[in-house]
Amino acid sequence: MSAPLHLTITTPAAVLVDRADIVALRAEDESGSFGILPGHADFLTVLEACVVRFKDGADGVHYCALSGGVLSVEEGRRIAIACRQGTVSDDLVALEGAVDAMRSAESDADKRARVEQMRLHAHAVRQLLHYLRPGRAGGVAPAAAPEEGPS
């Protein structure tokens, strides 16, 4: 049997998985689901939002829900996945709950960002109107009436 795979799954903020005892991995890209076993050819693909399933040498199955990412296989034994966000679990039901919580938090953060953006936009418009008000020092002067020429 070939040597096991070394799997790392990272986000910009954390290393989610760093294991050297993986015997099989399944993931999903645009073309569909695929598997990787020890000795796999070098490979690079963009992952869709999916659940990566990996099996260790003791037949334990583990899961990592990703919001998409990049997977590479090097030398038939090193798998690296870089993603923006991910959640790891050994239980699919617990993973589903964690993903729901993550999506809910993301949705709340998006709403807060939109509200803040609207608040800043309204403030900028008020400031522009304040400084462009006719007759205000430094503001726009009223348009002068055209001079009448000789008749």
Image (tube, rainbow, N blue to C red):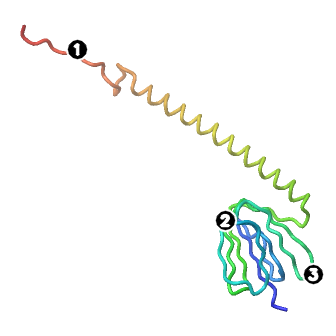
In the orientation shown, which residue stands out farthest toward the bottom? 1
Mark 2–mark 1 distance (CA, rounded to whole Å): 62 Å
Q: Nearer the viewer, residue 127 or 149?
A: 149
User: Residue beneath label 1, please?
Assistant: 145
Instruction: Identify the element where label 2 is drawn.
Output: loop
Mark 2–mark 3 distance (CA, rounded to whole Å): 30 Å
Q: Do the residues labelled 3 and 1 touch (CB within 8 Å)?
A: no
Q: Quadrant of the N terminus?
A: bottom right
Determine the residue positioned at 35% across, 26% down: 139
Tell which tag, 2 or 3, sits nearer the viewer.
3
Residue 150, compared with residue 44, is above or below; it is: above
Earlier-in-chain disc, 3 versus 1: 3
Give, as a three-letter code, the residue at label 1.
Ala
In which quarter of the view is residue 48 placed? bottom right
Q: Nearer the viewer, residue 55 or 29?
A: 29
Earlier-in-chain disc, 2 versus 3: 2
User: Residue beneath label 2, please?
Assistant: 12
Mark 3–mark 1 distance (CA, rounded to whole Å): 90 Å
Earlier-in-chain disc, 2 versus 1: 2
- Give the image location of residue 88, x and y in percent: 82, 65
- Give the image location of residue 146, x and y in percent: 19, 15
Give, as a three-letter code, the residue at label 3.
Ala
User: Residue beneath label 3, please?
Assistant: 58
Determine the residue positioned at 49% across, 30% down: 125
Instruction: Identify the element where label 1 is drawn.
Output: loop
